[in-house]
Amino acid sequence: MLIEISITNFRSFREKQTFSLLPFGKIRNREIKVLQPENYPKVQILPSAILYGPNNSGKSNFIKAFQALEWLVLKSGNFNSDQKLHANEYFHFDKQTKEKPSTFELDFIAPNRKRYNYQVTFGEKSIIKEYLYSYNITNTGKIALNTLFERNEQAIKFIALKGAKESVNFEPNQLFLSRGDIAGNAELKDVYSFFSNQVISLTFTETEYTNFLTRKYGEFIIDNPNSKISTLVESILQETNSGILGIETNMVDISKINFPDDISQEIKDKLFEQIKYDLRSKHKLFDGDSEIGIDTIPLKEQSTGTRKLIGISPVILNALLNGQVLLIDEMNTSLHTEITSWLIELFNNPITNPNNAQLIITTHDISLLDRNLYERDQIYAIEKNEFGASNMYSFAEFTGLRKIDNNRLADFYETGRLGGLPHIAKPYLENLISQFIQDGETE
């Protein structure tokens, strides 16, 4: 489970920005149930959150921060000594930040049900700081923060970390966490598994998004022929009035593809990866008013929204099954608001989310604020300041909202008093456009 993430000097984030899934204590009559970690009875965690903001405000960069940290954890253990840390995407619009490192700090509960705080500061070529702490419950029931290790460049201090550690070798550009996982340290493997198995993040253009997800669906069904997920996806399609009875999935025979003679095998393999699964949607076939059987059509002929629902459903079902943290950029694009709302409700409902999965999405869809899907502390806004840096804040920080019903938050947000909206100089731009039309295209 994710508790908090802080981001400093990464892409559009200049100063430290924190996104928290800890409930805001002053919200009364909370309608959305919070998650209860098994080993921390006094800790409550939010099951979902939503991030609003205008175009180019930093919403996608927020999710890319997770991807950068995940990449660093999963890949750096096998880096060559001269390999650069491409996750160091510093804030570009300040000369001072180009000389400074990036920092990520993550508070989470790993698959071993222990709570950790992990911090890493890094530049283009090396890790500068790397700290790992655990939260332990004392005999009196209080939470104690234990230091497992603290690393400053190549100097590392072990305090409470048990198991193999002194023998773990690491280069300046390698995370000790990653090397410890490779070396087989039990606790570090548990921490590592949070990044490798528990966090799923999706950021694509709409076409890439839909094509990627439908390919993943085909791959999953072929690799797991007995999985119940395909049956569930068919039920979702049938019960959302898509007109689709199911999905037929087959592997394409590569020998029957006529590739041009002048392309390399490497390019052929990459092209085949894009088309290797033949997905077709199944529909009722009629002769006039009489149903006579079933026919299929290529899935690519379905709408973008239908293909997105087919692709995203297994991801969501897997997250609910395995208690994963799922981050989706612009989740609602091409999906009807009713369907998006229902998918969010799956995470808010303890009946469909008994394994403490979490869903974090970015969106422009203000109508989602009117559906009692979120409390104020689950809603974040993001916008850029005069320096081009992204600032992120929770609606719970606005004291004036305490008397506003949740189903009126959209109206309040649209007034602009909460920020996170595009600022359009309409009269000025309309005058420019009017003048352009009058004068014509050429000077």
Image (cartoon, rainbow, N blue to C red):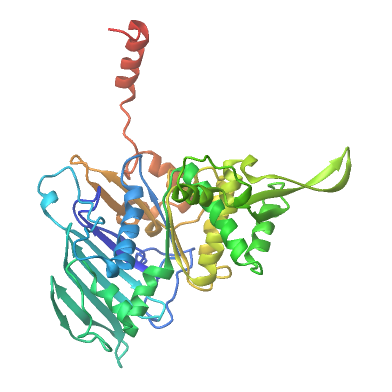
- Residue 341 seen in the figure: no
Q: Residue at x 27, y 75 (%)?
A: 179
Place of residue 160 in the rendered image (x, y in percent of width and height, measured from the top left): 22, 87
Q: Residue at x 53, y 73 (%)?
A: 354
Q: Say which of 125 and 414 sits in front.
A: 125
- Name the side, left or right, on which 248 lies relative to 148: right
Q: Say which of 11 and 420 sits in front.
A: 11
- Name the side, left or right, on which 222 lies relative to 370: right
Place of residue 134 in the rendered image (x, y in percent of width and height, measured from the top left): 28, 80
Q: Residue at x 19, y 66 (%)?
A: 81
Q: Residue at x 20, y 80 (%)?
A: 149
The image quarter in which residue 40 lies: bottom left
Quadrant showing the C terminus: top left
Query: Where 409 sits versus 377, above or below?
Result: above
Place of residue 31 in the rendered image (x, y in percent of width and height, measured from the top left): 49, 63
- Name the side, left or right, on which 69 lies relative to 330: left
Q: Say which of 50 and 323 sits in front.
A: 323
Quadrant showing the N terminus: bottom left
Place of residue 253 in the rendered image (x, y in percent of width and height, measured from the top left): 63, 52
- Name the side, left or right, on which 254 lies relative to 5: right
